[in-house]
Image (cartoon, helix red, strand yellow):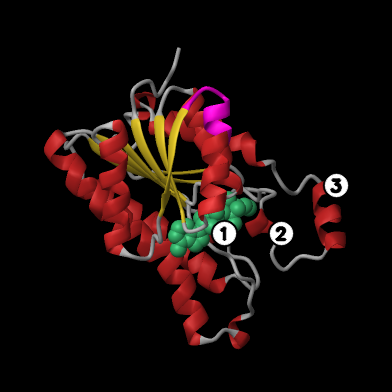
Amino acid sequence: MQLLAGKSIAMTGGGGGLGRCYGLAMAKAGASIAVADIDMAAARATVDAITHAGGRAIAVHTDVTQAAAIDELLDRTEAAWGPLDVLVNIAGTFPRRALVDMAEAQWDAVITLNLKSVYLGARAAIRRMLPRGRGVVLSTASGTGIRGQPKGSAYAASKAGIIGFTRAVSLELKDTGVRINCFGPGATDTPLWRVGKTEEEIKRLLAAGFVYQPDEFSNVVVFLASDYSAPLNGEFISRDLHR
Ligand SMILES: NC(=O)c1ccc[n+]([C@@H]2O[C@H](COP(=O)([O-])OP(=O)(O)OC[C@H]3O[C@@H](n4cnc5c(N)ncnc54)[C@H](O)[C@@H]3O)[C@@H](O)[C@H]2O)c1
């Protein structure tokens, strides 16, 4: 059974470590995907992986910090695959920086890319979904938003912001047929996770079983994008809050 048969999905950060796995899994579940990324070569590589596996995908150059770019992404998704069913916000960044060393511009850049992009994406998608009475917005939060992490104050604030944003918007969406949820996949071996770590550290953390592989959470994302998760609205589905 294909959980996402016929679904039209836009996914930001689709060229990244998690985006590639989640895109592939959603396409294998029957969805048609617009893979959006600011790095077009990375987006194309995800599209190649999907089409190679027999799925349907297009690459769309998108800067998620720009409202007009997000509208264009959704226009192109709908032109290629029909009315938008699901938006998956994945684009993000995690530059490790102690608070005392963090310039205001760096703080703003993290909050804009990780949090404002979610507001822009959700607003644009939900405006299209409400008149149709159906649709799902998913965003990539993080357990770091709850637990914190050294050198991660802006990142933690942005991810906690996504969780609060999701809860607030879900209340506005009550009984509309449109839903919004977010998830935290746990520390996962991707380029974002490796930033600021030495090879030694990476080896140690991998050997200690501290870090997951990118594909491990894919089926959770497929479930959250599907109608099987219909009872969930405003939730933060996280893997590793307790470890
Ligand atoms: N890897 C982890 O341990 C982990 C854990 C929890 C949450 N997350 C979250 O998952 C998401 C994806 O992370 P990842 O690990 O795959 O990282 P990644 O660095 O592999 O991928 C991030 C992608 O976002 C794209 N991007 C950056 N700026 C953009 C912009 N302005 N517009 C559009 N795309 C842009 C990058 O080009 C890249 O392809 C992030 O939001 C991250 O915070 C990751």
Q: Quadrant of ligand 1?
A: bottom right
Earlier in the chain: of badge 1 and badge 2, it is 1
Ligand 1 near label 1 (Cβ, under 8 Å)?
yes
Q: Residue at x 66, y 48 (%)?
A: 188
Q: Residue at x 63, y 66 (%)?
A: 149
Of residues 137 and 21, the one nearer the viewer is 21
Residue 196 highlighted magenta (yes or no): no
Quarter of the rendering containing residue 133 = top left
Determine whether the residue tagged by mark 2 lies in a helix, strand or loop.
helix
Give how far apart the Cα atoms at labels 3 and 1 are.
Answer: 21 Å
Q: Amino acid at mark 2?
A: Arg
Earlier in the chain: of badge 2 and badge 3, it is 2
Of residues 236 and 44, the one nearer the viewer is 44
Magenta stretch bounds: 49-55
Q: Which disc is residue 144 wearing?
A: 1
Kindly identify which residue carries mark 3: 207
Q: Amino acid at mark 3?
A: Ala
CB under 8 Å between discs 2 and 3 = no
Mark 1 crowd level (few <14, some 14–19, many ≥20, 10 Å Cα): many
Ligand 1 near label 2 (Cβ, under 8 Å)?
no
From the viewer's perspective, is 132 left or right of 17? left
Mark 3 crowd level (few <14, some 14–19, many ≥20, 10 Å Cα): few
Determine whether the residue tagged by mark 1 lies in a helix, strand or loop.
helix
From the viewer's perspective, is 239 left or right of 84? right
Q: Single out the mark in the foreground, 3 or 1.
A: 3
Of residues 46 and 7, the one nearer the viewer is 46
Kindly identify which residue carries mark 2: 194
Quarter of the rendering containing residue 191 = bottom right
